[in-house]
Image (tube, rainbow, N blue to C red):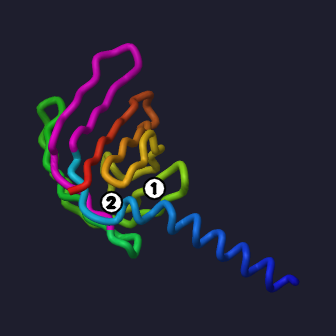
Amino acid sequence: MKTNTILATLTFSLFLFASCSPKLVGTWNVEKYERSTPGEQGMSVSNIGTITFNKNGTGTKNLDYSLLGVSKKDATPFTWSTTEQFITIEGDESEFTKTWIYIENKSDYQKWQSTDGANNVQTLELVKE
């Protein structure tokens, strides 16, 4: 009986993880990156590069953009994990390395939001290549 319960729990956990991650596997174009503070005008950049998610929970960023006249290049590897509501990207220090909330989670379009701890809201829109 105990073995059946453990097996059922493991199967459900694997199904839950597998049902979320295949949507992300592959290369995504970063169509839009926006940073805003409530009550103030935000900043937005478009078509800034790609993010690739590998099936084994690793990935690479290949981004090149400018905000407030400061050019940024982010071409670094990362690890990722996901749940039904969140995606966490871990790696070096980057504006993209954090936990994001899924706003839209489709197989060809992703929209995520996060904060930076200083009342700034970040929005990321991805389109599958």
Instruction: Please determine whether, in this image, residue 39 is positioned above or below residue 31.
Output: above
Q: CA distance from mark 2 to mark 1?
A: 13 Å
- The question of residue 79 being in magenta is answered with no
Instruction: Please determine whether, in this image, residue 33 is positioned above or below residue 68.
Output: below
* Disc 2 crowd, CA 10 A, few/some/many (<14, 14-19, 20+): few
Residue 92: which disc?
2
Quadrant where the N terminus sits is: bottom right
Q: Position of residue 93 (x, y in %)?
A: 33, 54
Give the label, 2 or 1, closer to the camera.
Answer: 1
Q: Please give the name of the residue rendered at 35% of the width and 46% of the height, measured from the top-left corner.
A: 110
What stretch of residues is rendered in magenta? Answer: 31-53
The residue nearer to you, when weighing 58 against 10, is 10
Q: Is residue 85 left or right of residue 112?
A: right
- The question of residue 36 being in magenta is answered with yes
Q: Of the residues shown, which amino acid type is indicated by label 2?
A: Asp
Find numbered disc 1 in the image and state the secondary structure of the residue it sits on: strand
User: In which quadrant of the rendered view does residue 33 lie?
Assistant: top left
| Residue sitting farthest toward the top | 39
The residue nearer to you, when weighing 10 against 119, is 10
The residue nearer to you, when weighing 3 against 120, is 3
Q: Of the residues shown, which amino acid type is indicated by label 1?
A: Thr
